[in-house]
Image (cartoon, rainbow, N blue to C red):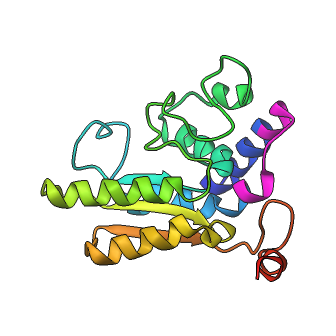
Amino acid sequence: MKTETKIRINQLKALHAAQSGHPGGSLSCTDILTILYFKIANINVDNFHDKNRDRIVLSKGHAAPALYAVLAEKGFIEEIELLKLRQTGALLEGHPTLKVPEVEAVSGPLGIGFSQALGMALGAKIQNFSYRTYAILGDGECNEGQVWEGAMFGKFHKLDNFVAIIDYNKLQSDDYCETSRRWSL
């Protein structure tokens, strides 16, 4: 079975067990997270505490089941934890939390993960570290002023060690992004 197929199946199992969550937003960023964790980013179980390992921040926090399934497949967390998603006292909450040691930043409020990732990239520059920071945003999240202010911050500080990836699935919480933009004008 292909890695991304197993990750998708595990996400759906976790969401079904929880009886809540965001399957669409989770499934739409699976390929992004899989490629980052398995092919691009310098991050694995053996180097997680290395100051020069790459950072990956899931700014679209409602897609946490995708992140958790990738972390399980990568060996960071036990696969059985996925079936406890959103249970009181369990390790995995509905949005990324620092309770999970391998999660880089708390996210959920739109744009906050993006800003934290920019701070990590700036910190690397200041301290002369060579790691890259990747932030995965939802396209609906890009309506937030915090995201645009963050983008200007990144340009101003010449953060060439920062990569923003937009999961362009054309959907927001309960509608298409295009419909939501029309209402906000």
Q: Nearer the viewer, residue 123 or 84?
A: 123
Where 124 sits versus 103, above or below?
Answer: below
Residue 51 at x, y = what percent?
Answer: 22, 44
Q: Main secondary structure of the magenta part?
A: helix
- At a point 84% along the width and 78% down the height, the residue shown is 179
116 to 156, vertically: above or below: above
Question: How far from the left and from the top, in percent, is residue 157?
Answer: 26, 72
- Determine whether, in the image, residue 42 is placed left or right of residue 58: left
Q: Nearer the viewer, residue 9 or 180?
A: 180
41 left or right of 84 in image: left
Q: Is-magenta flag for residue 111?
A: no
Toward the front, the furthest residue is 185
Q: Is residue 19 magenta?
A: yes
Which residue ends up furthest to the left in the rendered image?
128
| Residue 121 visible in rendering | yes
Q: Quadrant of residue 47?
A: top left
x, y percent for residue 113: 50, 53
Direction from residue 5 to residue 144 in the image, left or right: left
Determine whether 70 is above or below 17 in the image: below
The residue closer to the viewer here, 112 or 67, is 112
Given residues 71 and 94, the one toward you in this image is 94
Q: Residue furthest top?
A: 89
The image position of residue 146, as x and y in percent, is 52, 64
| Residue at screen point 76% across, 83% down | 185
* Bounds of the magenta segment: 15-26
The quadrant holding residue 69 is top right
